[in-house]
Image: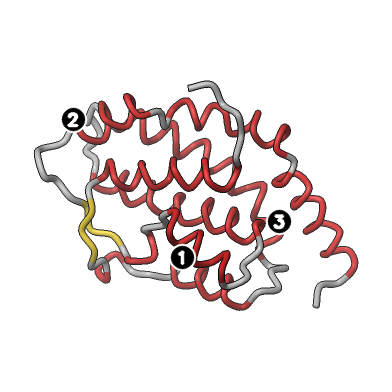
Amino acid sequence: MLRDSARAIYLSLLGVLVTADSLCVHLEELHNKLQYRQRVRYMKDYFPIHYTVKVHYEDIYRTINVTHMRNKSFTEMDLKLLWVYINSQVLETVLEILPKRHPSRAYVESISTLFNYLRMDVEKVVGDIEDERVEEILYRVSDMDPWSRTKSIRPKALFDNCYWVMKELFRCNWVP
């Protein structure tokens, strides 16, 4: 059980993450950067045909995962927290494979910076998570060594997943 002060921090962050207007404004730049044309340009066109990246199975966070987790009684806050952490890890993985002068590097770095800001806001409550399932997922995502990556996926698919899960979780009225 959370202490009163920790619960207050958790609830205040929950209020920030749940307030659609507040968070939608903060996520608008990320939404704009993840538009379809940019994802195709930077994550498909600038890569060789059929190029894949090795990731951990847990790094692939799709809308179907969100649906399954909702059916297993994960809270919306937990789903949003996982979205931030998992996609932060995905961005680090993509940056590892990109050469310094790759045309997509600045694009991925700008998105990574936005996720770093989101992650700083969320890290305040990570230690106060009540659900052991979320703690287990966060532990698996953060403590995996690069040599245990077994799933091959296209970089664009990773960014597509990030975008569609963001749309599913936050339900903002962004202009396309």
Q: Amino acid at mark 1?
A: Ser
Task: Give whichever of discs 3 and 1 has the lower sequence position.
Answer: 3
Question: Looking at this view, is 160 or 113 the one in front?
Answer: 160
Residue 65 lies in what quarter of the image? bottom left
Q: Nearer the viewer, residue 126 or 33?
A: 33
Q: Residues within 10 Å of mark 3 (few under 14, many from 20)?
A: few
Q: Which mark is residue 124?
A: 3
Q: Residue at x 41, y 55 (%)?
A: 62
User: Disc 3 marks which amino acid?
Assistant: Lys
For residue 170, above or below residue 36: below
Instruction: Looking at the picture, tell me which residue is in the foreground, 133 or 93.
Output: 133
Side (left or right) of 138 relative to 10: left
Residue 43 vs 18, above or below: the answer is above
Judging from the image, what secondary structure is the residue with disc 1 in?
A: helix
Q: Report which residue position mark 1 lands on.
A: 142
Please name the residue shown 90% across and 67% down the image: 4
- Secondary element at image label 2: loop
The part of the image, by quadrant, that contains residue 102 is: top left
Pointers 3 and 2 in contact (CB under 8 A)?
Answer: no
